[in-house]
Image (spheres, rainbow, N blue to C red):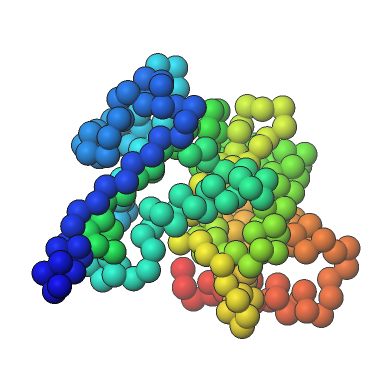
Amino acid sequence: MFNFLLNKLMAKEIFWHIIPEYQQTTLGKLFKNFDDTYSYEGEFITKSPLSQVYKVAIEDKNFYLKKYNISRKKVQRYLGQSKIRTELENLLWFQTLNVPAAKVVAYGQETKGWITHRGILITEELLNSSDLANIADEYPHLIQQADWLEKVSHQVAQAARILHQHRFAYNDFKWRNIMVDIKADYPQIYLIDCPSGMKWYKPFLEFRIIKDLACLDKRAKYELSKKQRLAFYKDYAQCRKLTVKDKKRIRKIFQFFHNRE
């Protein structure tokens, strides 16, 4: 019995799934199994202690291949659900809330027992888009256009409000995780890279909401006026006049990263 349980615990299992609409495409044939996909590289984009991201060009489209290697962080291997699974579920859940997010194409993971070792997430490139932090660096004239900024700010406020109303905190709600279509008549935002987001309950939820809004304001304070930042909060809170509670929260948002930068 002990040997059976031990063998079960150490057995390697691989799960691999391609979204149905891509299964019979060139992408589906190229990435037909987990191991082939994990060994594929493409154009290197970025990396973190847990993952690497590559751009893959297939026919007339680009895709982002994100590879997780959880075994590099030995403690995190044992702590709850894998990052790759969390990010996948968050992106799919955003779509059910009508919160624009990167489109998932394929995903999978390799486990031994309950421990995740490797993971893969493929998303479709968002055409003509750039993250909001890069836009501020490379296309500052867009940030300075009141109409463009108002449309983007409204969408970000709406997305944050919807997630927070569902007790969900992004946990890394930075400008670099917000993509914007910079060539559309109406700039459309999309959320990306959310492996740490999760639902919270009182008394922890309010702190997480403040952290999300502080992450957004961390770059906003350098790019926007205080009036514009307050307008964003009012849009988020759907209020015309700030209450005592709002003012208390705003002070915490503005001070959240004080002496941490």
On screen, residue 167 above or below 37: below
Taking the spot 68% from the left edge, 35% from the top edge, the residue there is 187
Q: Is residue 232 above or below residue 214?
A: above
Indicate the position of residue 67 as horizontal and vertical percent values: 31, 45
Q: Residue at x 31, y 30 (%)?
A: 31
**From the viewer's perspective, is 101 left or right of 51?**
right
Q: What's the residue at 72%, 32% (across, down)? A: 186
In the image as oriented, which residue stretches furthest toward the right? 240
Residue farthest top in this picture: 59
Q: x, y percentage for residue 164?
A: 66, 64
Determine whether 105 is above or below 193 in the image. above
**Residue found farthest to the left:** 3
Q: Position of residue 214 (x, y in %)?
A: 59, 66
**Coordinates of residue 48 in the picture (x, y in percent):** 32, 53
Left or right of 87 on screen, residue 214: right
Q: Residue at x 29, y 64 (%)?
A: 114
Work out which quarter of the rendered image holds the N terminus and state it. Answer: bottom left
Name the side, left or right, on which 144 lies relative to 137.
right
Which image quadrant is residue 39 in?
A: top left
* Residue nearest the observer in this picture, 129 or 56: 56
Kindly tell me whether residue 246 is visible in this rendering.
yes
In the depicted view, which residue is nearer to us: 257 or 203?
203
Residue 227 visible somewhere in the drawing: no
Q: Is residue 24 above or below residue 79?
A: above
Toward the viewer: 23 or 175?
23
